[in-house]
Amino acid sequence: MVQTTIRSAATFQGIGLHTGARVRMTVRPASANYGIWFRRSDVIGRNAMIPAIWDAVTPSRLCTVLENAAGVSVSTVEHIMAALAGCGIHNALIEINGPEVPILDGSAKPFVSAILGRGLQELDEPVRCIEIIAPVEYREGEAVARLEPAMALEIDFSIDFTDAAIGRQHKRLSMANGSFVRELSDCRTFCRQSDVDAMRANGLALGGSYENAVVVEGEKILTPGGFRRSDEAVRHKMLDALGDLALAGGPILGRYTGNRAGHAMTNKLLRALFAQPEAYRIVECDEYRSRNLPGAGVRIGDIPAVA
């Protein structure tokens, strides 16, 4: 399989979930081996280019934040990164005129729809994957994030919430053959109303609403229409995990297991992986591996219908 980029630019406008800032973001084509970069078009006099790579992640409890050496950052990148990875995009320049990626409907579906609507452009360079050859694990109390060998990327995730509207959920999926687009791309951010109230009291979640998150409290689902899927919550955690794993710098061939894991833990797992050179190797994707990458063979018709 050769590397790809988006065929023509796709533009999105909306607000940031946490900052409430209104932004305009454009995903543009890029050349082979470029990777994924963000450019803050509103930043003058400092380096505005921010690489979408694991060691540019800066600590944040609520989302994934990337920051360059000049202190210029962009936050909540996980959904657009998941969309790029799930559609098989390896190279892109993302121009944004504010500090946070727009949340849109709280899922990756609007990004996926635009990317597949524009189409993919093949580039004359092979895809290089990160093959997991030995288990790597990161733990914090009962929370666990783990990578281990597998023929293709698999995500196995478990959550356990006291709120009866969510409760315990578990799902395992191979990301091959467009599975991300069909099974995960439409699944939205979720949160408790009490957490939203606490965050807003501290100047956070300023752009949150029932239009871009599923809000619950105990056994009640406060967002009109409720969940799109009965297990939408764990599916969204899997979406987040794919977006955070996409910061590895290439597609991962391995099984990711997350139990009560979040953005920070997945990044710490990547840091643990790259600190152990014996646990992975960089391989050029042959025909078999290429067929099992997340974006291989994906079609616009794979996008789930959403009421």
Image: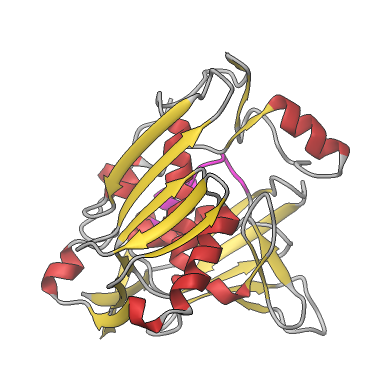
- Residue 277 colored in magenta in the image: no
- Between 201 and 269, the residue placed more toward the observer is 269
- Between 10 and 87, the residue placed more toward the observer is 87
Instruction: Single out the residue that lies furthest toward the left.
Output: 288
Check the image and report above or below for 85 versus 131.
above
Residue 76, given in percent of the width and then of the height, sits at 63, 55
Q: Residue at x 74, y 41 (%)?
A: 207
- Residue 112 colored in magenta in the image: yes
Residue 176, given in percent of the width and then of the height, sits at 23, 55
Q: Quadrant of residue 267?
A: bottom right
Q: Quadrant of residue 158?
A: top left
Q: Is residue 163 visible?
A: yes
Task: Say whether residue 216 is left or right of residue 46.
Answer: left
Instruction: Single out the residue that lies furthest toward the front.
Output: 141
Q: Is residue 109 visible?
A: no
Q: How many marks?
A: 0
Residue 1, given in percent of the width and then of the height, sits at 20, 74
Task: Say whether residue 68 is left or right of residue 87.
Answer: right
Task: Say whether residue 214 is left or right of residue 285.
Answer: right
Residue 210, given in percent of the width and then of the height, sits at 64, 27
- Between 307 and 162, the residue placed more toward the observer is 162
- Locate the C terminus and report the quarter of the image it occupies: top left
Q: Residue at x 71, y 72 (%)?
A: 41
Check the image and report above or below for 107 versus 93.
above
Check the image and report above or below for 206 versus 115.
above
Q: Residue at x 23, y 62 (%)?
A: 150
Q: Residue at x 86, y 42 (%)?
A: 202
- Between 14 and 60, the residue placed more toward the observer is 60
Task: Say whether residue 69 is left or right of residue 224.
Answer: right
Range drawn in magenta: 103-115
Instruction: Single out the residue that lies furthest toward the top.
Output: 219
Q: How is the image coloured?
A: secondary structure
